[in-house]
Amino acid sequence: MTHPASTTPWQLLQSARARLAQTSLNTLFAESPQRADQMTLSTAGLTLDYSKNRIDNEALVALQTLAEARQLPQKIDAMFRGDVINRTEQRQVLHTLLRSPRPGLTGEQQEIRNAWKKIANFTDALHRGEIHGITGKPLTNIINIGIGGSHLGPAMANLALTPYHKPGIRVQFVSNVDASDLAEKLRGADPETTLFIVASKTFTTQETLANAQTARSWLLEKTGNRDAVANHFAAVSTAIDRIAEFGIPPEHTFPMWDWVGGRYSIWSAIGLPLALAIGSDRFEEFLHGAAAMDNHFQLAPLAQNMPVILALLSFWYQNFWGADTLALLPYDHYLREFPSYVQQLDMESNGKSVHMDGEPFPQPASPIIWGTEGTNGQHSFHQLLHQGNILVPVDFILPLKSHNPTGNHHDLLVANCLSQSRALMVGKNLQQARDELLATGMDEKQADALAPHKVMPGNRPSNTLLTDQLSPSRLGALIALYEHKVFAQSVLWDINAFDQWGVELGKQICDDLLPEIASTGECQRFDASTNALLARYKAARNQS
Ligand SMILES: O=P(O)(O)OC[C@H]1O[C@H](O)[C@H](O)[C@@H](O)[C@@H]1O
């Protein structure tokens, strides 16, 4: 493919970068009183203010021209139409179909409807106390066993929607093969009321199968009844036969499909633990929120398209400003797992180095996603955001209403969030720092010595994403926003966002290592470092 750097929009962007490097955000605001209004978009209950970015109309138009040259509108249509856009796996990408049925894809839609009916019926029956364990007690303690896309989405959303949890139902998540994860969830669990959901698209994932087998042994030991698995296990997978082999009956078996990527699968039966936590009606609202964002992504012109704007900005900072990270800072305690969720979504989708046609490309793609809940980060890593020599664009996410209005806590939270984005932007120059010190009564010599340490370069970009209150539908829209952002970025880089070959080698080597770990002899098959580390492990194991 043509290297993007040789295209006209790329060259226009390079000159825009040179111009904007000389222009402060303060100046951009001073020059354009309408800037905040013009650079604010609202859709699906979310409002994005992207005015605090090192961008102007000319650069935005050049970015949009690049997106058009990459055929972004056509590629959005191709995804929604069900074209085989995941070419390395020869798969359609139809997670959007799970939240908004469309004409034309009838076979899939019937399957989706049936699966959804099964999820809703099971959820409603469990809430009515009609799903029983082997001793006849209603099941109320749900433990989801899955990893990656079969864990991060439901676990994050379950936490985010805590205020909507049904009373009397407890939903927990086990992902790590480290036995401590499962052990912590089993400690004090009542086997008579516990339901395990084994969630695995492939039903081959080592960690999930190991945890499922251990949970099964625990259940059989505690109940002393070999038939207990049928009552106390449910499963979600494309591999229905493997679920049956595990001993899980058809009425507890929930299907999924090849055309749903793991990290895009919360809308499928992988969302079952979330439905059990919040109820089927709330889960439907969650789907509708995402569908509203889908509608916007499909129909809005690039210049007013929220996921596209976020993608263009990420692309802009990474390829033209050398910003290889993006901080996600939700100012909402319930959204604290959102950065971990987007880590998989973005980094597993776009952490690649070849184009669609297999040709290598030189630029980095997918920023490193990180972050934590505000205000906690302010007392930790924000120092680097404000004064470090690394440019870190930030997405602030802020619900306007609290689920727990108490005193002036929410005013404080909002004030902190808005102060951080403003401080990053306006900064403090040497003269201001010096004047402030002198105003405290400090002498000139001391002020001159200290002032450089107090300088804040400013000009640090951020987006602010508002929502009224973090409800199921708003969360659905927020997740869909980032899903589509990631897809739009992949189109700009001409990457397949829907495969993940990079995770395979580690799995293969692990399979190779396991027999060596099990054996007692000395291992010489691997590199000297790995052999020596294995030997240390075996020595420690022998001592225990
Ligand atoms: O759902 P599963 O088939 O168990 O897969 C779980 C996870 O493992 C894989 O290694 C992939 O990296 C993830 O994309 C996937 O979500």
Image (cartoon, rainbow, N blue to C red):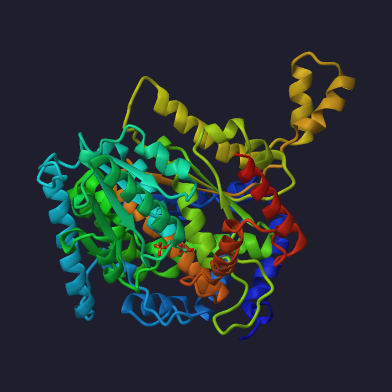
Q: Front-most of 35 and 306?
A: 306
Q: Front-most of 515 and 434?
A: 515
Q: Answer left or right for 296 relative to 169.
A: right
- At x 37%, y 45%, the residue is 173
Where is residue 411? Give x, y as percent. Answer: 42, 27
State whether residue 378 is above or below residue 111: above
For the question of whether residue 437 can be seen, the reply is yes
Where is residue 291? Give x, y as percent. Answer: 28, 62
- At x 13%, y 49%, the residue is 124
- Ligand 1 is found in the corner quadrant, namely bottom left
Q: Front-most of 202 and 320?
A: 202
Q: Answer left or right for 349 relative to 474.
A: right
Quadrant assignment, res 544: top right
Quadrant assignment, res 477: bottom left
For the question of whether residue 291 can be seen, the reply is no
- At x 68%, y 50%, the residue is 391
State whether residue 435 is above or below residue 43: above
- At x 11%, y 42%, the residue is 136
Quarter of the image where the N terminus is located: bottom right
State whether residue 49 is above or below residue 140: below
Where is residue 87? Give x, y as percent. Answer: 46, 82
Looking at the image, the residue that sits furthest to the top is 441
Looking at the image, the residue that sits furthest to the front is 521
Please state the total of marks drawn on the protein image.
Answer: 0
